Image: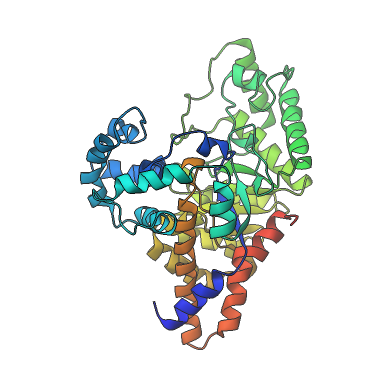
Amino acid sequence: MTPVEKQLIDAMAEMDIIDCHEHLGPESERIDNPADVFNLFSCYPYTGRDLMMAGMTYADYLSLCDQDMPLEDRWKTLEPYWERVRWTSYSRAILLAAEKFYGESEINESNYAAISERMSKANTKGIYDRVLRDACRIRKCLIVKDIPYVKTDILTPLNSVMMCDMESWSSVSHPQFAPNAQIKTLDDYLDSCKQYIVESKKDGVVGLKTVSLEYGEPDRQAALSEFGQLKSGKIERLAPAHNFPDWYPPTALRDYISDELVTFAGEQDLTVAVHAGYWGDFRKLNPLHIIPWLQRHPNVRFDVFHLGFPWMRETLMLCKGFPNVWLNLCWTHIISQQATIQALDEALDLVPTNKILAFGGDYTAPSIELVYGHLVMAREDIARVLARRTGEGQMTETQALDLARKWFWNNPVELYHLNL
């Protein structure tokens, strides 16, 4: 770190933060369960995936959090693979968190038991506040959680109705968000969706969450036909049952309903958050899939998550070419710090600075401490980009900090119309 980078990081550490994406449930999901060092490895899509790419079996990965197994046995399972993934960005967030909260800058055979003991003692009511408010200075977390959503004074939800199963008659006639609804027609289903969105907005929901699939043009007649086939039992499912992250192919019913709900989001002045890029077969999640939506719905605000990694430059061009696109750096810092630095540097050349949201941890309750590790990495990435600009005389340090404050606070507040 250069002196200027350090100065910027120190200044950013004093800023209040809007965390633009988490999957946190209620604090009870953490404190009602035992905690040990393996909580830090419990986020399957991140270090868990790295461990499996390094050769660990899925069954062995699941065993790491099996509290019925002795801690020593679980460590023996992890140890050879941990050395293989130690240097990834995902793993760096783990080590930063372990140092901050449990006093150990490494995790190894000599200290895993001591870390586990400290974690167990710290696994008490108030851990969310200690991590999010005190250590991170986070004032609001925008969260996506399975229906029903969770809302507290710090957790502000997005509505995930657009990600519900719409491929079988049972899922349409008894939707997850309204299991007691009387669904007989396609419009009944749409009305039920819209009522749920209106009610959730009154309860503090600030946006809808969806994914960047290859949606077709909305066709009401084709959607009505598929709805009728499901209702009559002529077909059991429109598409194979999907288990995240194995995405389903588009259907006319989903294309039509999704487009109607995007329209309704605009009418309700809600932002549409879009998962784009990396996850499972990420070819199906290209951020460019949403261009027809951007064109059909110019008055709807779209927040493109993860900079569409690995299509980061393409995602920057979405923001360059469409005024209703924002760029969300959630998750990107722990996918690759170097890639994020390069993309953010290019973003300064390409897009207005009010279109960038700096941070979202993208973690679940068992690994809450990793939000801090991720935030440290985000500050580093931003400091490296802005310090180079100040060093070249393109901006002053004061201007650089003003940009950081916009990215961490002002922009998400304005985009999601947050009441603080």
**Closer to the camera in the image, 182 or 94:** 94
Q: Is residue 280 left or right of residue 134?
A: left
Residue lying at 57% horizontally and 20% vertically, measured from the top left? 168
Residue 108 in sight from this viewpoint: yes
Kindly indicate the quadrant of the structure image that contains residue 225. Answer: top right
> Where is residue 344 drawn, in percent x and y?
49, 68
**Closer to the camera in the image, 404 or 349:** 404
Q: Quadrant of the N terminus?
A: bottom left
Query: Farthest residue toward the left?
Result: 80
Residue lying at 75% horizontally and 55% vertically, measured from the top left? 419
Is 55 located above or below residue 410 in the figure? above
> Where is residue 336 drawn, in percent x and y?
39, 59
Q: Is residue 138 left or right of residue 51?
A: right
Q: Quadrant of the C terminus?
A: bottom right
Residue 328 in sight from this viewpoint: no
Is 318 located above or below residue 380 in the figure? above
Residue lying at 63% horizontally and 11% vertically, measured from the top left? 232
Q: Is residue 321 left or right of residue 89?
A: right
Is 92 located above or below residue 386 in the figure? above
> Where is residue 392 drawn, in percent x and y?
47, 87
